[in-house]
Amino acid sequence: MHGRVARTERLTPGMVRVVLHGGDLEDLVMPDATDAYVNAAFRPAGASYDEVFDPKAVRETAPQGEWPARRRFTVRTWDAGSSELTLDFVVHADEGVASGWALNARPGDPLVFEGPNGGYRPSAASAWHLLVGDESALPAIAASLESLSPAGRAVVRVVCDGPEYQVDLESPADLDLRWLHRHGDERDESLLLAAVEAVEFGDGRPFGFVHGEADEIRAVRRHLLQERGLTRRDLSCSPYWRRTMTDEAWRRIKREYVAAMEAEALAS
Ligand SMILES: Cc1cc2nc3c(=O)[nH]c(=O)nc-3n(C[C@H](O)[C@H](O)[C@H](O)COP(=O)(O)OP(=O)(O)OC[C@H]3O[C@@H](n4cnc5c(N)ncnc54)[C@H](O)[C@@H]3O)c2cc1C
């Protein structure tokens, strides 16, 4: 599938919103999930194939050096009426294919992708909802919060670089939201864990949505399973990205990493 950039918006110094329209978006089928994501394909400069392409066909016909870079991005909103798809990109200090694309996106630029796919939507059966992550998880956290009912309760902890990096999060539910601000040193890696350790659980079993940087997610997950008595069925955990690694490097070791993470749960 592909869409074309309709407009962009700088939401914060660290986040660019890209709204896509046109292309074949009218055929998009949105899954029933608030963490739905597309698997975008970024064509390298100078590639011999068209700017709108079939990623699978390119892998079969083009030399490996021309294969597109693959990156996943959450659907912030899908407006079926206008066929507009909104994605929010973290534009981080480290150079990245996707981050760079979003910073330079201009109206009319195509974005090729597969999906969307996704698996999480807050259930009314959960006593309350715990949503934890960094900026990369904000689109999913925002969409999840908007889907809650007024009878729901959500505790949200999000880490970002500072007050100007925060985005508006709204929910009909009772919302306990705290932003954690990085210091720019090694303390940053345990900010989310410390914030979750400080949450008063009270009555009822929460469902935990924990997505973001791999090691931070893993530490929070371990705490929830081993010290808060949650089970794997009470959690959606996804190590979206890994500090110091490009997505290509991360995907090469992700399966092994996730298996080791899963084994920690079994040991509890
Ligand atoms: C299912 C899923 C949904 C996702 N949804 C979103 C989303 O909606 N929005 C979003 O921004 N990201 C999202 N991500 C994360 C995103 O795919 C990765 O962050 C990806 O690595 C970004 O690609 P890049 O080309 O910008 O950087 P890369 O080329 O992959 O990495 C370059 C450098 O930047 C660092 N880096 C990568 N991501 C970040 C970051 N977020 N903050 C700081 N440094 C970083 C890397 O560690 C590396 O050192 C999602 C990931 C998954 C698996």
Image (cartoon, rainbow, N blue to C red):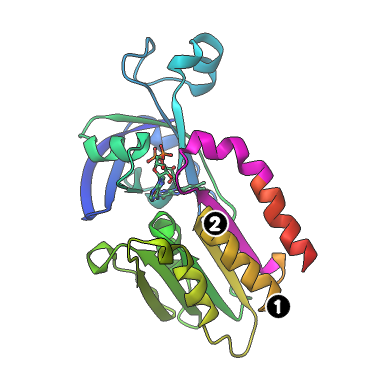
**Residue 105 part of the magenta segment:** no
Q: Pick the residue in front: 128 or 181.
A: 181
Relative to residue 75, is residue 125 drawn left or right?
A: right
Q: Does label 1 or label 2 sit earlier along the sequence?
A: 2
Image region (quadrant) for ligand 1: top left
The spot of residue 140 in percent (x, y) is 45, 58
Determine which residue is flagged by label 1.
Answer: 229
The local secondary structure at tag 2 comes to helix
The spot of residue 104 in percent (x, y) is 22, 35
- Quadrant (top left/top right/bottom left/bottom right) for the N terminus: top left
Determine which residue is flagged by label 2.
Answer: 215
Residue 215, placed above or below residue 148 = above
* Category of crowding for the residue at label 1, using alpha-carbon neighbours closer than 10 angstroms: few (below 14), some (14–19), many (at least 20): few
Q: Which mark is residue 53?
A: none
Q: Which amino acid lies under the numbered mark 1 shown in the image of this protein?
A: Gly
CA distance for labels 1 and 2: 20 Å
Whether residue 66 appears in this view of the structure is: yes
The local secondary structure at tag 1 comes to loop
The spot of residue 31 in percent (x, y) is 54, 49
Front tag of 1 and 2: 2
Q: Pick the residue in front: 7 or 206.
A: 206
Residue furthest right as drawn: 267
Residue furthest bottom as drawn: 202
Looking at the rendering, the stretch of residues picked out in magenta corresponds to 233-256
